[in-house]
Image: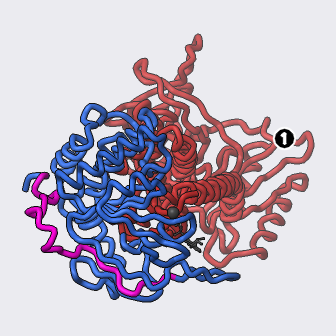
Amino acid sequence: MLRHLFTLIWNRKRANLLLISEIFFSFVVLFGLGTVLITAGKNFLTPRGFESAQVWRLLVRAGQGQKMPRAELDDVLRQVKALPGVQTVALTSNNLPFTFNTNNSDFVYKGRKTPFANTYDADDHYAEVLRLHLREGRWFAPADDGTHHRPVVITENMRQYLFGDEPALGKIFRYPMVVKNTKPEHEFQVVGVVDNVRMTTEFDEAIPSVWMRLLPYDTTHWETAAVLVRVAPGQGGALQEKIARTVAGVTRQWSTEVRVMEDDRLHRRRYTLVPVVGLGLMGLFLIINVALGLFGVLWYNISQRRAEIGLRRAMGATGAGIGWQFLGEMMVVTTFGVLLGGLLAAQFPLLNAFDLPTQPYLLAIAAAACAVYAITALCAWQPSRLAARIHPAVALREE
Amino acid sequence: MSPETDLRQPDAAAPDRAVPVLRLRDIEKVYQTKTIETVALNQVNLTVNRGEFVSIMGPSGCGKSTLLSLMGLLDEPTGGVIEVDGRAVTSYSDKELAGLRNLKIGFVFQSYHLINDLSVVDNVELPLLYRPGMGGKERRQRALAALDKVGLNARTGHFPAQLSGGQRQRVAIARALAGGPEIILADEPTGNLDSVMGEEIIDLLLELNREQGVTIVMVTHDLQQAMKTQRVIRFFDGSQVG
Ligand SMILES: Nc1ncnc2c1ncn2[C@@H]1O[C@H](COP(=O)(O)OP(=O)(O)O)[C@@H](O)[C@H]1O
Ligand SMILES: [Mg+2]
């Protein structure tokens, strides 16, 4: 019977072309949507590599035209750290987790260039505040003060890009552009490797990252300073106010905003999810449209094929058999559409488009195929039952 | 089993030892619609014996197609009993009736009812598709044998649209024969054909009846055609009149 259905559909391919192309189209849309959702979901479930709970960020500003000398900044940090409820304080660059600021660059090691990596400035307490997981070596420490090259800590994926499977500690890499008189501090020496981090959004994959130690430096040209604070559990508005007052107390012209990193995370999550949900709704709307179209076409087909149904009944088909036949035909048509769509979808992993891993693509293909079969089966169900109820005696009624 | 053995051989040419294939007793058929009630058949009693060629005549709307749909187990009578091979089918389920139709009955329709998107041989295989346990090879073999009987073995790969009306009706007859039925029911098989082609179809049916022993019940408007058959039954307004 299945062969019969294939023959029938194949011979009717012209008439079935519309159905097949609608199914193909739905498959491709579902595949795209599935890839996005599966990739995002998979990333979401991957460890973030740091802890944002109980971390606040301060944006310390010197007033208009004011300078921010190192000594005063250190004094501010010391005083904030001394507040009860504050556990650790770290100075960093303003591309903080879940914010929209990014700094990035590519690097070279022995002529091999890496993809773009996120770069952060970080002091000796940064790892403690964000609870990064060290895999090799150590985080920055006062012992680094006298080093020739600038000490850096890199993520595991960055290590892979730079050194492959070779050990990383002690190795020196640099920026790709060749500058005359490159100073030793413009080259980077690895002191530690941490687990991959996902700091931009919760749905992005881990981007290779490099933390560069804040050297003993002159901060007088700074206008703002980004400070991370890890607080004890249960701290809230009262401590936030105290921090703001403390900063203002050290130097009159300075001020600070206190933000909770968990709020940044949720804000970024919403911001990222809105287009995804929008895309999902559009896809859903499209699929509903296609489903209604399928339903209509099937309904019409069956009314067109009353004589054939009567004939088949006369030849010995049962009512239920007719119903299954129509359902089966729809599944065969779906198979053609899914095969075409699958052929297209398979190009993405094969051509390594978008540099994504293969697995989400395969999962998306499987999910889209299942969804399309389910949708068409659902659409074909009622018309098939209608076909099953057509009276066999219609065969003898001449229109 | 060879395809031939399933097609009825002449029943030792013994007309006095009549074996009833199909019997209608006190059949009544009333079509009930919202507004009107149509009595399509009224107290019909009829027996078709093995090897017979019976024609049914009557004006349009007198219930001939209705009679054929009852004989072919496509519909249930409002009253009376239908017997196939001596057994009443009154309480048969949809599945049992479908099985009986498949095994015992072949249909030929006025407008052929071929499936346009299937080749000639695929069309002829259709009834065998509904026969449990029959493999593709045997189906093909039987279909080709049936096409051979109607003289169309050169056209097996054609599609219905490529055939003349007479050829299409031959395909339909081959399809009716393919399952090796007890009886072929033909509803105005020449109704859509010109007289030359119509004659060819009647001659084919007569030949199948005479040489293969196929039992046939045929509805026709043509008295000349009817006179060539062994028995003519006349209908008027739902009742048998001769
Ligand atoms: N499904 C049906 N519903 C209602 N009336 C019907 C139906 N089929 C046939 N009839 C009526 O039954 C009568 C006999 O019809 P039919 O058997 O087709 O006659 P014939 O084949 O002799 O022309 C007609 O009056 C016809 O209108
Ligand atoms: Mg009629």
B102 part of magenta stretch: no
Q: Which residue is mark 1?
A: A67
- Boundaries of the magenta span: B4-29
Nearer to the camera, A128 or B59 = B59
What amino acid is labelled 1 in the image?
A: Lys
Residue A204 as seen in the image, left or right of residue B133: right
Above or below B132: residue B42: below
Q: Is mark 1 within 8 Å of ligand 1?
A: no
- Colour convention of the picture: by chain
Q: Is residue A329 visible?
A: yes
Where does the image place residue A276, in percent across and percent down from the top left? 65, 53
**Residue for point 35% across, 48% down:** B202
**Residue for point 32% across, 75% down:** B97
Nearer to the camera, A158 or B228 = B228
Nearer to the camera, A332 or B36 = B36
Q: Is residue A357 visible?
A: no
Nearer to the camera, A247 or B196 = B196
Where does the image place residue A264, in percent across and percent down from the top left? 70, 59
- Identify the element where label 1 is drawn: loop
The blue chain is: B
